[in-house]
Amino acid sequence: VRPRKQGFCSNYSHMRRLAPAVYDNYYHRVLLGERVLGLPPGAITSAHLAEAKRVLSSLQLVLLSNDASTPATLQRATGIANFTACRDTTRPAPCAMSDEDSERARRDNAHDLALYAYAERLAAQHVAKWGAGMG
């Protein structure tokens, strides 16, 4: 038995087989609902990406949970005070994947990475819009 490397997640492939909805294009699966949630690993396509972009584009407000501007933008957009940052971005990740698993995760989630990049652009537009006092 080989000792586990400290600080490395050694079970990415195993967890992907057990829970593909979590480890294979999770954003698509959640955003597009039940019809896409149960698809097997690797089944998310560029057609799903286009559909997910359409869904995101239809939302009045898209924000990134760990962005510093999110609490103030939420307050301006909703009128509700006391929003706090969703995540402390100064904390190190509790577990780092090996380079091989990181590359596999990037390949497995290429559509989610593209969708996230699109969401970042939408969020920047929405922060600018609400920061200018428009609604």
Image: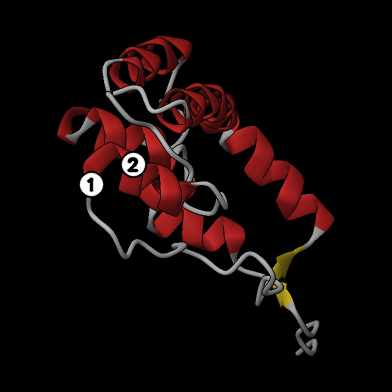
Q: Is residue 117 left or right of residue 64?
A: right
Asked whether the viewer can see residue 62, the reply is yes
Separation of residues labelled 2 and 1 (CA atoms): 5 Å
Q: Are marks 2 and 1 in contact (CB under 8 Å)?
A: yes
In percent of width and height, residue 92 lies at 71, 73
Residue in front for this viewpoint, 92 or 125: 125
Displayed quadrant of residue 32: top left
Residue in front for this viewpoint, 74 or 5: 74
Residue in front for this viewpoint, 79 or 17: 79
| Residue at image coords 45%, 17% | 45
The amino acid beneath tag 1 is Gly
The label on residue 79 is 1
Q: Is residue 93 left or right of residue 40?
A: right
Residue in front for this viewpoint, 22 or 91: 91
| Residue at image coords 59%, 32% | 113
| Residue at image coords 79%, 85% | 6
**Against 50, is 27 above or below?**
below
SS of the residue under disc 2: helix
For label 1, count other residues whose C-alpha is less than 10 Å away and answer few (under 14), some (14-19) or many (20+). Answer: few
Residue farthest to the left, as pictured: 34
Residue farthest to the front, as pictured: 133
Quadrant containing the N terminus is: bottom right
Asked whether the viewer can see residue 38, the reply is no
Q: Is residue 31 left or right of residue 94?
A: left
**Against 67, is 111 above or below?**
above
SS of the residue under disc 1: loop
For label 2, count other residues whose C-alpha is less than 10 Å away and answer few (under 14), some (14-19) or many (20+). Answer: some
In percent of width and height, residue 19 lies at 38, 55
**Against 126, is 100 above or below?**
below
In percent of width and height, residue 120 lies at 55, 30
**Residue located beneath label 2 in the image:** 76
